[in-house]
């Protein structure tokens, strides 16, 4: 795709993320959530499904020939693929915690080329296009200048789907190496915070492409480093993620002991 094609898709992604964000806020802390588990530690709510419907309908209206891969409704195969998480941080959302995001990316031949992460509760929209930089509400952002683990605050994401033992061992190594570690429940927002320098790194044993497609592009376009999640068939299979400021990425990757290459 050329720049005009990417910009056209980025505009639609931003508009749909804002619309989905308004939809999610309409359900937030309300009585109509209808939470159910679709797997271990994997909740879905009426808001996830409503936001997913409106995003998919909007993509079909604007770019009928593009494919769509969504956390809530699966996908088909296409060279140009929209990768959608209507609500990343569903646990937080379902418990009334205002830390969740809408994530929409466009991938070409299996790699993200533009995307947005929208935090509706904070009215923040992060956006990036490959080669075009990363932005927060239209202003350029950059990853932090952290140069040593002891200067950092990072997030180590966790899902009970993959067991606590490896997480326990990983956070032990990170803390021993001097990293400041927290866990906040939205991979997309954690990575967006790496991109704007609020935190210095993010790692997690295993994520799906809809969690990271938009946000990993934010990190690389903001001058941070992120492992090659989309190598091979990362789009379909998912994998580990290690993202961080350039000055601490090597130490973060080593302490995480995840199998990643920049
Ligand atoms: C989850 C969040 C969480 C991460 C989990 C993801 P979801 O996504 O991003 O922070 O640690 O691994 O599954 O289910 O809320 O969209």
Image (cartoon, rainbow, N blue to C red):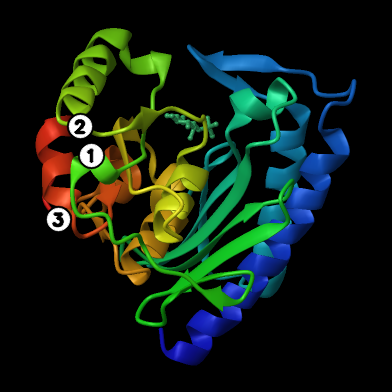
Residue occupied by mark 2: 178
Q: Position of residue 130 (x, y in %)?
A: 37, 76
> Looking at mark 3, is its residue's CB closer than 8 Å to ligand 1?
no
SS type, badge 2: loop
Cα–Cα span, label 1 and label 3 = 22 Å
Residue occupied by mark 1: 150
Relative to 37, 225 lies left or right: left
Cα–Cα span, label 1 and label 2 = 5 Å
Dot 1 alpha-carbon crowd within 10 angstroms: few under 14, some 14 to 19, many 20 or more: few
Residue occupied by mark 3: 262
Q: Is residue 150 visible?
A: yes
Q: Are marks 3 and 2 in contact (CB under 8 Å)?
A: no
Residue for point 71% across, 36% down: 49
State whether residue 220 is above or below residue 233: below
The mark lying in front, picked from 1 and 3, is 1
Q: Position of residue 71 (x, y in %)?
A: 53, 39
Q: Are marks 1 and 2 in contact (CB under 8 Å)?
A: yes
Relative to 228, 213 lies left or right: right
Q: Is residue 258 visible?
A: no
Q: Nearer the viewer, residue 199 or 158?
A: 199
SS type, badge 3: loop
Residue for point 63% across, 26% down: 92
């Amino acid at each position: 795709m050329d720049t005009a094609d990417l910009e056209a898709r980025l505009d639609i992604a931003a508009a749909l993320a804002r619309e989905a964000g308004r939809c999610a806020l309409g359900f937030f802390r309300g009585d109509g959530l209808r939470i159910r588990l679709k797997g271990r530690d994997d909740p879905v709510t009426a808001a996830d499904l409503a936001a997913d419907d409106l995003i998919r309908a909007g993509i079909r209206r604007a770019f009928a020939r593009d494919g769509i891969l969504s956390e809530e409704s699966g996908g088909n195969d296409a060279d140009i693929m929209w990768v959608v998480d209507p609500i990343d941080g569903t646990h937080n959302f379902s418990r009334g915690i205002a830390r969740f995001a809408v994530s929409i990316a466009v991938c070409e031949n299996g790699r993200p080329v533009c995307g947005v992460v929208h935090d509706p509760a904070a009215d923040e929209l992060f956006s990036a296009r490959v080669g075009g930089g990363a932005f927060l509400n239209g202003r350029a952002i950059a990853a932090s200048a952290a140069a040593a683990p002891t200067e950092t605050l990072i997030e180590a994401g966790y899902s009970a789907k993959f067991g606590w033992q490896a997480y326990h061992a990983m956070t032990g190594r990170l803390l021993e190496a001097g990293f400041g570690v927290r866990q906040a429940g939205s991979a997309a927002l954690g990575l967006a915070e790496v991109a704007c320098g609020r935190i210095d790194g993010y790692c997690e044993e295993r994520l799906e492409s809809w969690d990271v497609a938009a946000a990993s592009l934010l990190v690389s376009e903001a001058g941070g480093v992120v492992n090659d999640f989309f190598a091979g068939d990362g789009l379909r299979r998912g994998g580990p993620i290690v993202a961080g400021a350039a000055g601490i990425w090597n130490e973060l990757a080593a302490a995480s002991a995840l199998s990643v290459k920049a």
